[in-house]
């Protein structure tokens, strides 16, 4: 099972290293990690997706709470969050496939961000399911480069 954890931390040098070290030192695997600023310049928000059962989630939460730079931890279940991921990719095209790639992109509300003779750079945002379906469809054309941000999430209700 995949768990999404939102961790509010102090925006200080070394915090990411300490948190990543806690995960590796305890044998927890991070599926994705996203870190960014908040409205308060003294804090950052980490969105961490970790695989494991409820016991693993409980241990991760307990270990994070022990770290001095951690301010607040929220465990998000899929029912209570709005989540998105950003993907940038480069897809092979030719004169015969260019229109089809662009049409599929339109259906998924993807954006063409760069056009070259033999490829298109595409930006797509959405939930993991949407992204995975789009990648599957683009795979037949040949994806030559890909980068994913990992999940970012907000609670549906404010706390």
Image: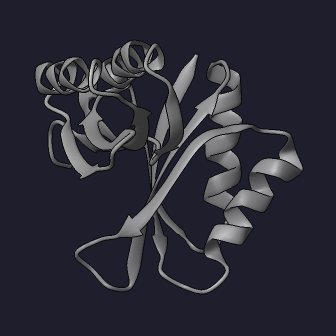
Q: Quadrant of residue 74?
A: top left
Q: Position of residue 56 (x, y in %)?
A: 70, 28
Q: Position of residue 28 (x, y in %)?
A: 77, 38
Q: Position of residue 159 (x, y in %)?
A: 20, 49
Q: Nearer the viewer, residue 134 or 56?
A: 134
In this picture, is 156 found above or below 104? below
Question: Residue at coordinates 38% horizontally, 85% vertically from top-left?
Answer: 42
Is residue 83 at least partly visible in the picture?
no
Q: Position of residue 94 (x, y in %)?
A: 34, 28
Way the structure is coloured: one colour
Is residue 34 at least partly visible in the picture?
yes
Q: Is residue 123 left or right of residue 76?
A: left
In this picture, is 63 found above or below 27? below
In this picture, is 136 found above or below 16? above
Q: Nearer the viewer, residue 11 or 33?
A: 33
Q: Nearer the viewer, residue 45 or 114?
A: 114
Q: Quadrant of residue 105?
A: top left
In this picture, is 134 found above or below 23? above
Q: Quadrant of residue 2?
A: top right
Question: Residue at coordinates 32% horizontally, 49% vertically from top-left?
Answer: 116
């Amino acid at each position: 099972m995949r768990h999404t954890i939102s961790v509010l931390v102090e925006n200080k040098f070394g915090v990411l290293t300490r948190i990543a070290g806690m995960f590796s030192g305890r044998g927890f695997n991070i599926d994705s990690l996203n870190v960014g600023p908040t409205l308060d310049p003294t804090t950052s928000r980490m969105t961490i997706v970790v695989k494991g059962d409820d016991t693993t989630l409980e241990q991760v939460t307990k270990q994070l709470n022990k770290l001095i730079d951690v301010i607040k931890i929220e465990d998000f279940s899929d029912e209570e969050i709005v989540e998105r991921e950003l993907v940038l990719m480069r897809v092979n095209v030719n004169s015969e496939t260019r229109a089809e790639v662009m049409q599929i992109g339109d259906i998924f509300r993807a954006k063409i961000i760069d056009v070259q003779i033999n490829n298109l750079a595409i930006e797509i945002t959405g939930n993991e399911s949407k992204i995975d379906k789009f990648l599957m469809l683009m795979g037949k054309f040949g994806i030559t480069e890909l980068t994913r941000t990992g999940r970012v999430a907000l609670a549906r209700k404010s706390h």
